[in-house]
Image (cartoon, helix red, strand yellow):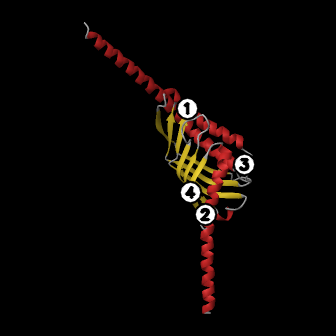
Amino acid sequence: MKKILVILGVLLALLVVVLVIASFYIGSIVKAGVQAVGPKVTKVAVILDSASLSPFSGHGTLKGLSIGNPEGYKAPASIRVGVLSVSVQPSTVFSSKVVVRSLKIDSPEITAEDMGGNLNKLRDNINASLGSEPSARRFQVDELVIQNGRINLTMGLLGGKGTTIPLPPIHLKDLGRDGQGLSGGELAQKIVAAVLEKAIPAIAENAAKLGKDVIKGADDAVKGATDLLKGAGGLFK
């Protein structure tokens, strides 16, 4: 009996080791997949610092996600996300349709250049990539939450002057629930469209205000220079 218990103990220990190793490699697979498929879909550099996913609970975390800027724009990235939390139905991790229970993106930073022209270009890149992804993997996202985001608005016509504005919260449900689910590109398209739907009006409103501030600043500078010249002219009377 003692010998049997020892063997069972060894087998259980081996099982735990295998599961831990599997969990580690799942994170590596996610990171490699994001960095391989991301640029094909967005046509810009996509970098992910790390990814972890537990095969037991299906909970995972992606850290340091950076999506580059389309050609012709100056900022090094159009979107940065510090931490992205995901909860996946464990039984679907390796299936053709991955069921994501929740996807939460907290404190994303979006850089919008020239009235969001770079974001529109990014959206066009994703739309053009639909149907061309190398993977047949499909996705269902039951809940998507984007919160505490901010938009860095810069305008080349105003000499690079910019401002930071809050991104309104975004809450989507039941993406890809019907049918076979969404491809990676289709999911990205829906997320980007939702972000732009909230971001573009905020960008337009604040860009107009930014332009008025710049014009007012220029008017004030001209008025100040005029007053200075008037004052200087009085010295010679």
Is the N terminus in the top left, top right, bottom left or bottom right quadrant?
bottom right
Check disc 4 and report the residue beneath it: 50
Q: Amino acid at mark 4?
A: Ser
Is the C terminus in the top left, top right, bottom left or bottom right quadrant?
top left
Do the CB atoms of the residues marked 1 and 2 lie less than 8 Å apart?
no
Which structural element holds mark 4? strand
Give the mark toward the camera: 3 or 4. 4
Image check: 158 left or right of 141? left
Do the CB atoms of the residues marked 3 and 1 lie less than 8 Å apart?
no
Q: Residue furthest front?
A: 236
Q: Nearer the viewer, residue 237 or 180?
A: 237
Task: Answer with the quarter of the image where residue 6 lies.
Answer: bottom right
Check disc 3 and report the residue beneath it: 133
- Calculate the distance from the C-alpha at mark 4 to the C-alpha at mark 1: 32 Å
- Calculate the distance from the C-alpha at mark 3 to the C-alpha at mark 2: 24 Å
On screen, residue 91 above or below 4: above
Q: Earlier in the sequence, mark 3 or mark 2?
A: 2
Give percent across and percent down for residue 125: 67, 40
Taking the spot 73% from the left edge, 53% from the top edge, the residue there is: 135
Give percent across and percent down for residue 221: 38, 21
Which structural element holds mark 2? loop
Taking the spot 36% from the left edge, 17% from the top edge, the residue there is: 223
Give the mark toward the camera: 3 or 1. 3
Image check: 181 left or right of 101? right
Taking the spot 29% from the left edge, 13% from the top edge, the residue there is: 232
What numbered label is drawn on residue 115? 1
What numbered label is drawn on residue 58? 2
Q: Amino acid at mark 1?
A: Met
